Image: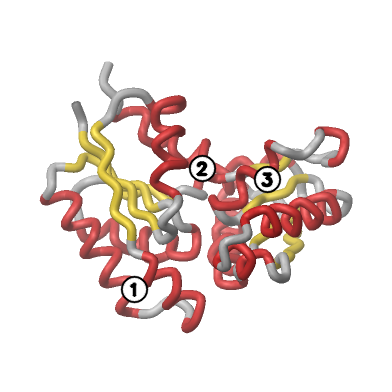
């Protein structure tokens, strides 16, 4: 059975991705590494050189541990994930790359919703890069849900979901497709009635984890 490594910056995500691996990928030996300090540092200071070094170090550790691929589940450190590819022989996947590739094919006006401002720039940059590669026009409209991240950090996921849901409904009326920049926001979409969201809403976990399908047991 192939071993794959998932690198997280939020403690609650290994359980989310365990379910997705079973449903979307198949049988793999999944190893989770969680380092919440990388997200804290990025939120407080932006992308630091030490964060880049640590992502590369985790990738090297995963390779030495026998992993055949690494999935970085945090969009905020996606840039560091791409740079770490030069450090190892195994593939390193950003969780949000499939989502970005799909978004720029759906419509010109792309809404990006996040609960952390630190996540907006890497998601925006990735979308613009994918649009340029395809020669597609891309007008990005951004929004940060005020108070949502703080509610989640303070142990109030219900309040977090309420704030995110309200902003999803508002921003969906202004764009052709809506992108949720953080994996932790994905569950909110499943709970919204379809008639409240008139445009496609793309999330990263499900499509992101499918990148590991080639490594599943046959």
Residue 117 x %, y %: 62, 72
Depth check: 103 or 27 in front? 27
Mark whose residue sits in front, 2 or 3: 3
Depth check: 131 or 36 in front? 36
For the N terminus, the image quarter is top left
Q: How many residues crowd mark 1 within 10 Å: few (<14), some (14–19), many (20+)?
A: some
Q: Tell whether 19 sits left or right of 164.
A: left
SS class, disc 3 = helix
Residue ID for mark 2: 205
Q: Do the residues labelled 3 and 1 touch (CB within 8 Å)?
A: no
SS class, disc 1 = helix
Q: Earlier in the sequence, mark 3 or mark 1?
A: 1
Looking at the picture, does residue 62 appear above or below residue 206? below
Q: How many residues crowd mark 2 within 10 Å: few (<14), some (14–19), many (20+)?
A: many
Between the C-alphas of marks 3 and 1, the distance is 29 Å
The reply to whether residue 215 is visible in this rendering is yes
Seen at 28% across and 38% down, the residue is 30
Seen at 21% across and 31% down, the residue is 2
Between the C-alphas of marks 2 and 1, the distance is 22 Å
Outermost residue, top direction?
A: 218
Seen at 79% across and 57% down, the residue is 167
Q: Earlier in the sequence, mark 2 or mark 1?
A: 1
Q: Tell whether 128 sits left or right of 8.
A: right
Residue ID for mark 3: 188
Residue 22 x %, y %: 40, 27
Seen at 21% across and 60% down, the residue is 87
Residue ID for mark 1: 51
């Amino acid at each position: 059975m192939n071993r794959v490594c998932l690198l997280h910056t939020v403690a609650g995500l290994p359980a989310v991705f365990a379910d997705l691996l079973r449903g979307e990928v198949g049988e793999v030996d999944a190893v989770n590494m969680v380092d919440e300090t990388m997200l804290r540092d990025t939120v407080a200071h932006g992308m630091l050189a030490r964060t880049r070094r640590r992502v590369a170090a985790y990738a090297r550790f995963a390779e030495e541990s026998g992993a055949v691929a690494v999935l970085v589940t945090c969009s905020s450190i996606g840039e560091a994930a791409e740079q770490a590819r030069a450090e190892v022989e195994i593939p390193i996947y950003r969780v949000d790359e499939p989502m970005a590739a799909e978004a720029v094919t759906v419509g010109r006006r792309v809404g990006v919703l996040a609960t952390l401002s630190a996540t907006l720039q890497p998601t925006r940059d990735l979308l613009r890069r994918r649009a340029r590669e395809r020669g597609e026009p891309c007008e990005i409209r951004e929004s940060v849900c005020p108070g949502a991240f703080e509610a989640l950090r303070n142990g109030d996921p219900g309040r977090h979901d309420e704030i995110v849901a309200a902003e999803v409904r508002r921003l969906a009326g202004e764009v052709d497709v809506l992108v949720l920049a953080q994996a932790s926001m994905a569950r909110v979409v499943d709970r919204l009635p379809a008639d409240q969201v008139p445009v496609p809403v793309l999330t990263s976990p499900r499509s992101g984890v499918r990148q590991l399908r080639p490594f599943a047991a046959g």
